[in-house]
Amino acid sequence: MLPLFDSPINWTVSQLTAYLQQLIAEDETLHDLWVLGEVSNATQATSGHFYFTLKDASASLRCVMWRQNVAYQLFLPKNGDLVIAHGYLDIYPPNGAYQLYADNLISVGAGILYQEFLQRKAKLEKEGLFDADRKKPIPAFPHQIGIVTSLKAAALQDILNTLRRRFPLAEVIIAPAAVQGEEAVPTLISALKFLDQTIKPDVILLARGGGSMEDLWAFNDENLVRTIAALETPIVTGIGHETDFTLADFASDLRAPTPTAAAEMVTPNLADLQANLQTLSQRLQSAALSRVSFQRARLSQLAHRLSISSPLNQLNVAQQRLDELTRRLELHVNRILQQQRSKLDLYAHRLESLNPSSILQRGYAILTKADGEILRSVHQVRIGESIQARLTDGLLNSRVEAISGDR
């Protein structure tokens, strides 16, 4: 039930929890924590996740480590162990409790080394030895690969197998060095300088298998870090497991989570190269065929244009035009002749109709006097005068016996 007095509601539980999560997410300090405490309530679930509580005399902190991080953990603490846990802080919404999400656990015996590790890291980082802008690019296709590690290390065989499988074309040069103990630092420095100054490979691998912080301590040596930073040759480190970080990793041009991963990072995959080469070959062939087809079409077009513009073609076109004009002229002349022939026939018919011979053939006669004057009227003759009658087939001589008509 709501209270009787006014009390405005600003938040739901979920909204408040989300707000607190946002505040924690925006605090950079809470993203990278190292927490010292005594372990209690330690238990590993069937899922593989490890749950525990860190406590001291005044407070306690719930913690969880996911199974993917547990897999790389060299040890899991027991209740009562004093450990240093690394991780980030966040809120678990179902119960509203904040907890540490740990990714690394270190026994308290290694705590002094971690303090020294952090001090050295801060000093070298301030000097710029870890700056991103000084990192050198790793060549995509190294012809020569230098390796610095122990000849007895199992990691060496893993690296060689990986290089042989992925990129057998590369030449591999091994500069052996101790990776643990008092001899580690001077032999590592000597091996790196030998490769960098004498052999001058395309890339150097600095590798070591997993171990405790004490086992990896040589790779946190300040002189070794400065040597790595001063190398002219690009260097890739593969030291320990994925959760292990050394100062050598920060100084290198590229850090790999494992030695095998380092070998993979510096080499292309031969199978991928062959597939890419086949793809490029097909694209090249397709492009070449397309280009040839285009050029053929272009050549055909140009040849057609050339043939159209050639003198012979112009002559042929002119000849065709002449033939066409000749045919038109012939048609025109024939039409005129036909018209004139028709007119001539008409005139001939008319002329024929006016021909005296034609009249005579119809039974008429032409009368003339003795002197040849054609008689057109009875007034031209007298009785007893001689006249001639021209018929179609001859002449008749006669005499006028009588005259009738209007005199």
Image (cartoon, grey):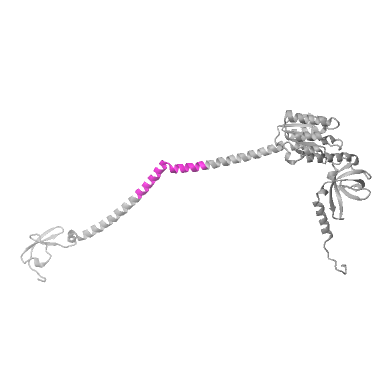
- Please give left or right for residue 210 compared with residue 355 in the image: right
> Looking at the picture, does residue 132 appear above or below residue 376?
above
The foreground one among 111 and 66 is 111
Q: Reply yes or no: does residue 310 show up in magenta.
A: yes
Check the image and name the residue furthest to the left.
384
Residue range (magenta): 298-327
Image quarter of the N terminus: bottom right
- Please give left or right for residue 366 compared with residue 183 in the image: left
**Residue 177 seen in render:** no
* Image coords of residue 352 (percent x, y): 21, 58
**At 83% from the left edge and 55% from the top edge, which residue is drawn?**
20
The quadrant in which residue 376 appears is bottom left
The foreground one among 331 and 349 is 331
* Image coords of residue 369 (percent x, y): 9, 62
* Image coords of residue 325 (percent x, y): 36, 49
- Please give left or right for residue 137 compared with residue 376 in the image: right
The foreground one among 164 and 179 is 179
